[in-house]
Image (cartoon, helix red, strand yellow):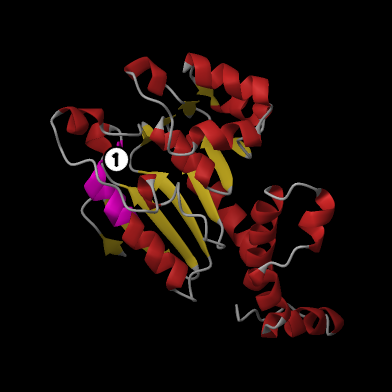
Amino acid sequence: MADYEFLKVERDGKLTIITINRPEVYNALHPPAHFEFDEVFNNFRDDPDQWIAIVTGAGDKAFSAGNDLKYQAAGGPRERPDSGFAGLTSRFDLDKPVIAAVNGFAMGGGFEIALACDLIIAAEGAVFALPEPRVGLAALAGGLHRLPRFIPRKQAMGMILTGRRVPAAEGKELGFVNEVVPQADLMATARSWAEQIMECSPMSIRASKQAVYAGLDKPSLQEAMLSDYPAVKAMRESDDFVEGPKAFAEKRPPNWKGA
């Protein structure tokens, strides 16, 4: 386990678990925490032995309350890394999957962290909101743009324009939450999703993630399907591309190398 001042980072095999460790302020984030996150995600991105990450919050009250407004009001520095809020919301080149295990409030920037992840697993008591307009701000760390892409536009606008709080069960109905589980089962469920992903070739997973997100930006289905994606090329040139069909033919589990 690697400890930072504001985060805890644990490696379990090919899984990286990142815990926001500011429970005294509901895991709200300030610039020093953003830069720690940036370093952690840079290390995760660059480590070939780390295939998937889970992000969660310390304690059972909050995943993250978002921006530390008291720190900001006290005149603290406002700089953030180029990778954005939590070193993630403006990181558009991360092909490895990230799961949000939301254990309580995911408010403002906290919700934006979760939206920047590929999957959201929520405890039954989790609550999501983009309340920035209520304090004279706007959800500019991706919330205003990701949420309308993930759920119907009118539903997204309803959340954005009112800042209302959405419980986990409604989040699943709307479509931005994958699964809702009891608080005690949250991390085990997130790990279960991670384990299912790790049964697949990491080269295939990265190719799939890159193609999905890059393809959504194409103007047509035809262009999305005919476009070239670097991670797809890497997959086709990898040992895993040979190992998968070979293992299937030999009726044995594949030995993925991630290269």
x 72%, y 67%: residue: 228
Mark 1 highlights which residue? Answer: 29
Say few, some or many: other residues with alpha carbon within 10 Å of mark 1 (under 14 / 14 to 19 / 20 or more): many
Residue at point 22%, 35% (across, down): 24
In the shown orientation, is residue 206 left or right of residue 163? right
- Is 108 displayed left or right of 175 in the figure? left
Q: Is residue 165 left or right of residue 224?
A: left
Q: Amino acid at mark 1?
A: Leu
Vertical position of residue 34 compared to residue 161: above or below = below
Chain part drawn in magenta = 27-37
Front-lying residue, 85 or 127: 85
Q: Residue at left 65%, top 79%?
A: 256
Q: Nearer the viewer, residue 127 or 190?
A: 127
Can see residue 206? yes
* Number of marks drawn: 1
Q: Is residue 44 above or below residue 123?
A: below
Residue at point 74%, 83% (across, down)? 243
